[in-house]
Amino acid sequence: MAFESFSAFLKMGEHGLYVWLAYGLATIVVLFNILGPRYLAKQLVKDHQRKLRREQA
């Protein structure tokens, strides 16, 4: 791609807002899909450990 300046690159011919919002939303979705299951797995392990401690007591 050839743009006259970095500012022109960011504006992308008046479509910059749409383009950058799409990239941002896609990044958020990907991060959620990566980090969400990790968080849920940690919670599951903690809950299981609590349950085992209760059963042993």
Image: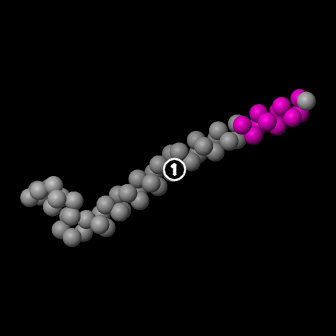
Q: Is residue 9 left or right of residue 47?
A: left
The residue shown at (21%, 70%) is: 14
SS assignment at label 1 = helix
Instruction: Give the colour scheme of this rendering.
Output: one colour
**What segment carries the magenta color?**
46-56
| Total number of numbered discs in the rendering | 1
Crowd class of label 1 (few under 14; some 14 to 19; many from 20; radius 10 Å):
few
**Amino acid type for the residue under numbered disc 1:** Asn
Q: Is 46 located above or below residue 34 in the figure? A: above
* Residue 15 falls left or right of residue 44: left
Which quarter shows the C terminus? top right
In the rendered image, the vertical position of residue 7 relative to residue 33, given as above or below: below
Quarter location, residue 6: bottom left
* Residue bearing mark 1: 33
Residue 19 in picture, x, y percent from top left: 30, 63
Residue 47 position, x and y percent, is: 75, 40
- Which residue shows up at 53% across the image and 45% down it? 35
- The answer to if 45 sits in the magenta stretch is no
Residue that protrudes farthest toward the front in the picture: 7
Q: Residue 54: horizontal and vertical position, in percent? A: 87, 35
Q: Residue furthest bottom?
A: 14
Q: Residue at x 47, y 55 (%)?
A: 29
**Which residue is found at the position 76% from the left and 37% from the top?**
48
From the image, give the main secondary structure of the stretch colored magenta.
Answer: helix
In this picture, residue 8 sits left or right of residue 32 = left
Quadrant showing the N terminus: bottom left
Q: Is 49 one of the magenta-colored residues?
A: yes
Residue found farthest to the right? 57
Q: Quadrant of residue 7?
A: bottom left
